[in-house]
Amino acid sequence: MIDSTECRPLDRRRLAIVRAARNLFVEQGFERTTLSDIVDRAGGSLATVYKLFGNKEGILEVVVFEQASSGTALVIEATEQGGTPAQILHRLSESFQVHFLNPEMVALVRIVIARSVSNKDFAQRFFERTATRTHNSLRQMFTTWHEDGIAMSAPPDILAELFLGMFVSDVHTEAISHSLRTNKSRTRLHARTEFFIAGAGLLD
């Protein structure tokens, strides 16, 4: 059991370890990064790493789930700024593209894809904490619009799935192709969002 007087120094040490591990995982990959590499960059000791995380897999879980958080906050932020559904969706598209195609996010998705082959539970936890939560937030947004009398051409659940799918597809393509196939231009983003808005029947 960790004594309460240790919490503040341990919190600082934990943050330093997570930051160092995240940078190393992105720079050289999960498999090639050792606990000694992480300690060398973060400072402290292996004993502290084991005390806080258990092992390298424990650090990976924290790194992945802290960095690859769900888009719930982005959905809330976009809707709270107000505007028409079309304006909100364009705003959200820009936020999602920045979030999902952040180089750190893409690198971590590569790690998740590789780890999911041997660790199904890890992959499922990642999916639940990212795509599922973001989908639920989007579904609630479309449901609220529907309840407010805004006409839509498909149920909220389907619209949430289709909208999120654009960005999940992009991050997977980016992760697998190493940026060879992903067009991240604002023109393409605007055109795709306009197409979705028209298909959803949400034109201003």
Image (cartoon, rainbow, N blue to C red):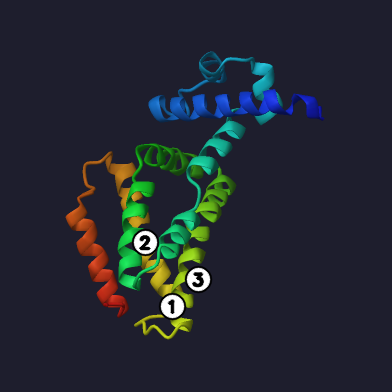
Residue holding disc 3: 140
How many marks the image carries: the answer is: 3
Q: Which mark is residue 145?
A: 1
Between circles 1 and 3, the one closer to the viewer is 1
In depth, the one of 147 and 23 nearer the eye is 147
Left/right placement of residue 135 relative to residue 192 reads right
Q: Answer with mark 2 or mark 3, whichever residue precedes in sequence.
A: 3
Q: Answer with mark 1 or mark 3, whichever residue precedes in sequence.
A: 3
Q: CA distance from mark 1 to mark 3?
A: 9 Å
How far across and down, in percent of the image, does residue 183 sit? 21, 49
Query: Residue at 43% across / 65% down in the picture?
Result: 79
Residue holding disc 2: 165
* In the depicted structure, whether residue 122 falls above or below residue 18: below
Quarter location, residue 39: top right
Specify whether residue 74 is in view: yes
Dot 1 and dot 3 residues touching (CB under 8 Å): no
Question: Amino acid under label 2?
Answer: Gly
How far across and down, in percent of the image, does residue 168 sit? 37, 55
How far across and down, in percent of the image, does residue 69 sit? 50, 48
* In the depicted structure, whether residue 160 falls above or below residue 176: below
Quarter of the rendering occupied by the N terminus? top right
Dot 2 and dot 3 residues touching (CB under 8 Å): no
Q: CA distance from mark 2 to mark 3?
A: 16 Å
Left/right placement of residue 182 relative to residue 156 reads left
Query: Residue at 38% across / 80% down in the picture?
Result: 154
How crowded pointer 2 is (Cα within 10 Å; few <14, some 14-19, many 20+) is rated as some
Query: Residue at 50% across / 44% down in the picture?
Result: 116
In depth, the one of 41 and 126 nearer the eye is 41
Mark 2: secondary structure:
helix
Q: Answer with mark 2 or mark 1, whichever residue precedes in sequence.
A: 1
